[in-house]
Amino acid sequence: NIVEVEAVGEAIKRALSRSGSRLKQAAAAVAGSTVITKVIPMQANLDGDELEDQVQVEAAQYIPFPIDEVSLDFEVLGSVKDNPEMVQVLLAASRTENVEVRQSALELGGLTAKVVDVEAFAMENAFKLIADQLSVPKDALVALVDVGATMTTLNVLRNQRSIYSREQVFGGKQLTDEIMRRYGLSYEEAGLAKRQGGLPESYEIEVLEPFKEAMVQQIGRLLQFFYAGSEFNRVDQIVLAGGCASIAGIAEMIEEQLGVLTVVANPLANMSLSSRV
């Protein structure tokens, strides 16, 4: 979760200033570990208000907190198989403090939260932007692996729907911290050197390669958790996302060591750009 709201707000403000963006609305997401999700059957003939009232009643059975301390939303997924009078409703809830801390960080950065999503659902939606870049059929098992600064998230999808999600503490900050420790740099200097170069020749062998090996091991471990708790024993393709996906050669290393076709996600490939960009 966000611990230093002011620091995050300042970082957002700096990023906006450097980008020159005039946008005032933003989307954020809460981590899956802080969210309770449940698919519940409900009557198909309920109108919008009736459905919302019934969801509130049903939610109280599954949420271990007072309902007035929770932010929740729902989505109708479709009819219940073999029972057209019922629909499947996806309920998602998180403590309101988890939502408000993200809203506060955005506000300190000069933005207004338009949407607060769930990370796993946001990744599922983003996956649709890269589906045509994959070399496997639509019903294949695809492991979307997001390696961020401090967390690595595995989201396994089939038919563009998430069927499994798991988080693990591991990310690019560990590489940055090692660069700081080994070369006596500040956090900002280490982050810049990591992206732009300028580190000693020993960096590749002594620092970067061990980190890449650790990254492969972490992804392999996440996949093993998935295999152990499901009917599957392999995925058809791995899609890398997050800052660490840009590390040179990491996709090839993962593919070689885990034996699974691996690509780096490019969600901007089909995006139209202004002539000024």
Image: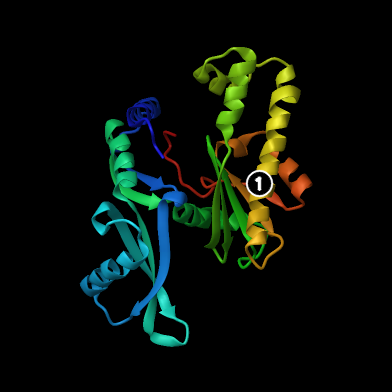
The amino acid type, in three-letter code, at marker 1 is Ile
Q: In which quarter of the image is the N terminus?
A: top left
Query: Which residue shows up at 42% across the image and 87% down it?
Result: 83
Q: Is residue 235 left or right of residue 96?
A: right
x and y percentages locating residue 21 in the rendered image: 35, 33
Q: Residue 120: in sight, yes or no?
A: yes
Circle count: 1
* Residue 106 pos. (x, y %): 31, 37
Q: Quadrant of residue 174?
A: top right
- Taking the spot 37% from the left edge, 25% from the top edge, the residue there is 14
Closest to the observer, 139 or 178: 178
Left or right, 240 with respect to 22, comes to right
Residue at the far top: name it.
184
Q: Is mark 1 on a helix, strand or loop?
A: helix
Q: Is residue 208 above or below residue 235?
A: above
Point out residue 54 in the picture as x, y percentages from the top left corner: 26, 72
Q: Can you identify the residue that label 1 sits on?
A: 219
Q: Is residue 198 visible?
A: no
The percent position of residue 53, horizontal first and vertical second, equals: 23, 70
Residue nearest the viewer, comparing 150 with 128: 150
